[in-house]
Amino acid sequence: MVNGVTRVRGVAARAGGWSARHRWAAVVIWVLFVVLAMGIGSAAGRVDVKDNALPGEVGQAQKIISDAGLEEPAGETVFVQGLDGTTKATDPEFRAAVDAVIKAVNGTGQVTKVTSPYTAKTLSKDGRSALIQFEVTGDADTAPDRIEPVLDAVKKVQGEHKGLRIEEIGSASMGKTFEDAFGDDFKKAEYSAVPVALGILLIAFGALVAALLPVALALTAIIATMGLMAIVSHVQAMSDTANSVMLLVGLAVGVDYCLFYLRREREEREAGHDAQTALRIAAATSGRAIIVSGVTVCVAMAGMLFTGLADFEAMGLASLMVVAVAMVGSVTVLPALLSLLGERVEKGRLPFLNRIKRGRRNKRGTGAESRFWRAVLGAVLRRPKAALALAAGALIAISLPALGMHTQNLTLDQEFGDSLPIVGTYDRVNETFPGGASPANVVIKAADINAPEVKQAIADFRTQSISRGASDGPIKITLHSAENVAVVDVPLIGGSDQKKAEKSLDLLRDHIRPDTLGKVRGLEAPITGQVAGSKDFNARIVGAVTPVFAFVVVFAFLLMLLCFRSLTIAVTAIILNLLSVGAAYGVLTAVFQHGWGASLVGAEGVGAIVSWLPLFLFVILFGLSMDYHVFVVSRIREARLQGRSTRDAIQHGVVTTAGVVTSAAIIMVAVFAIFGTLSMQSMKQMGVGLATAVLIDATVIRGVLLPAVMALLGERNWYFPKWLRWLPDLTHDESAAVPPVAAHHGDEDRDRVVRV
């Protein structure tokens, strides 16, 4: 501070000041950026993650197929079974139905290699069921888009044979089911999220224009990031999942950042400042908090890049980009728009809501403080030890179920329950032909696939797979002599029971393969398939937990340390965020694994947490939690720099930010809760986990635990040891206070100071 002047030195303040002075230029630059990013991205096209980027033996198997130039076809099966329990596969009616199915699917022109169950010996042990197997022509990746005529043909045959059950299942038909369900779910979520966010913002601001700004910023940030994702995908492949996660995160942080900025600008105007002064104060305070928060969230998202999993790397990079774009937009184009709009930001006011808000204004004439949170905070500050013990004890108790968390890739019946007919087909096929709906696939590569020792090894593998109890058969062998590759399909004992099927897989990998195929020098035989994919993915996720957790926690700690220049605040931030994540894990485990209250969210009988979710939730929640923490602590620090005592600063900071934190949290919880209503259990788990954590974070953590801890620490909140003072000072003093009505002098284009 020099002669009563605190210089505005921060990036956010400088960016906001420039944008306010060159408002049209800032708006045009932003629009051009969004249009160019989307245009270039559309022209470049998006490169998606390939199967050979999958972990473990699954990726090795896909690489062999790809290097050999083979197009692994989409396999399909038609299950035929008598409904009366007595009809045999040898009965004339049964044979006629089988012949009709073969004729019908061949007639579509979409299939090849149709095999009769009588020649392929794919009849059940009791002789009452049969499998007709065939392959879909063309690229397996696009087979789900072309399978509908085949499904229709099978349905027509079913209609002509009422005494039999005739159902189709396979990679293409299941892929179509997933795509339809996934697409319908996300359309529902996407169409609902924006109106929900807008409705809550209308209530929060009481004015249409003010409510539209955050949504507009979030949507333009999402559009720009979609274009950037396409461009970046030529270096780091992307995916539909990454796109959906990006949309979710982009809407959350885009609205949040804009909300923080707008509420501070409005608060300063209500305190008596003119529009330009209010804008400068918002840029120097909320703008800086947005940058600190945004960088912290980006660091958290970057943790996904350390998993070694292509899908996770895509999600991490996409999330990181949308946060960065939203952050830049919040401190550049938003000040420009506010400068252009001036008082018109209050256009479209809702009279009823504004009468309520005017009635709730405090004695200073501002509507910045919350009566509810003032009452809660008063109780917390009077008895901080009791508040800390009660809140921390409750969260630790909620977290305890997470100690027994079981993760796995969900099977079809776990993912969809009874909501889709194909789930019943999947269960019936697995019950009658264990493992037939999802066999293990052994991809064999040899110098000469027709060499006698190779043929003998394959034959021994086939024989021992059945004799040693890994499979009941039938085992199918497909030779590609020209490419020296063979593919062996092995139905696993255990079928849809993931644990039992994994035991069969381990028997194949650890014992039968070494004793047969492993004796041929130079032969490669990775084992892939649905069960293998789930097991390898889960193993890689577990291995990635430690480095990702360490990276996110250490870098978040360092950022907090540098930006607040307090060892105490950095440590408490990490502890409180970990407690929030732990509580979310506990709720997930209790509901989806143990079934406590599962009926309330339609999650009965799942029994496991989808394997990718805990790590994903940790990264996302750790980042999003920092939004609130940085915003609240920045306001407390600002009040402390004004000369208030630490206790008064805590009360002022928490109470004045309660409204915006509550509004932001309600939006996030509402948007995430939409995902909790979707049909796919993995999406339901994600929605419930995110909504629960944000709700806990914005209420118990920020409203009770944070002020209780800071009140108990007192002046030790600002402890920064001498041996750390060599670190860069990123605090700045932009947050210095401005009196309710302050004079600002000089040409606006040159005014870079805020008088105190």
Image (cartoon, rainbow, N blue to C red):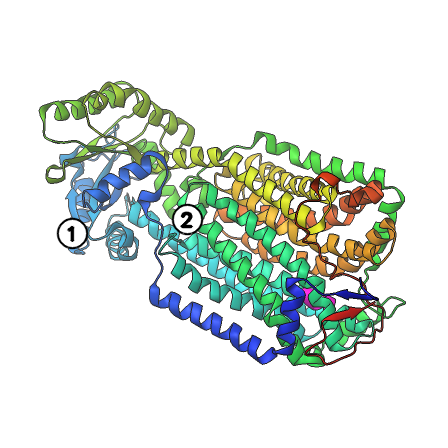
The quadrant of the picture occupied by the N terminus is: bottom right
Magenta part, dominant SS: helix
Residue 715 on the magenta segment = no
Q: Find residue 133 and report its horizontal and vertical position in percent.
A: 21, 42
Magenta region: 261-265
Q: Residue at x 38, y 56 (%)?
A: 233
The type of residue carrying mark 2 is Leu
Q: Which residue is mark 1?
A: 106
Q: Is residue 356 left or right of residue 471?
A: right
**Above or below for 598 versus 197:** above
Sequence-wise, the earlier of marks 1 and 2 is 1
Q: Is residue 463 left or right of residue 506?
A: left
**Above or below for 444 versus 105:** above
Q: Find residue 707 and report its horizontal and vertical position in percent.
A: 80, 47
Q: Find residue 218 and report its horizontal and vertical position in percent.
A: 56, 65
Is residue 741 among the parts visible in the rendering? Answer: yes
**How many residues crowd around disc 2 within 10 Å: few (fewer than 14), some, or many (20 or more)?**
some
Location of residue 364 (image quadrant)? bottom right
**How many residues crowd around disc 1 within 10 Å: few (fewer than 14), some, or many (20 or more)?**
some
User: Separation of disc 1 and disc 2 at Cα?
Assistant: 26 Å
The type of residue carrying mark 1 is Asn
Residue 264 on the magenta segment = yes
**Above or below for 84 versus 662:** above
Location of residue 388 (image quadrant)? top right
Q: Residue at x 61, y 63 (%)?
A: 255
Q: Which residue is mark 2?
A: 420
Q: Secondary structure at mark 1?
A: helix
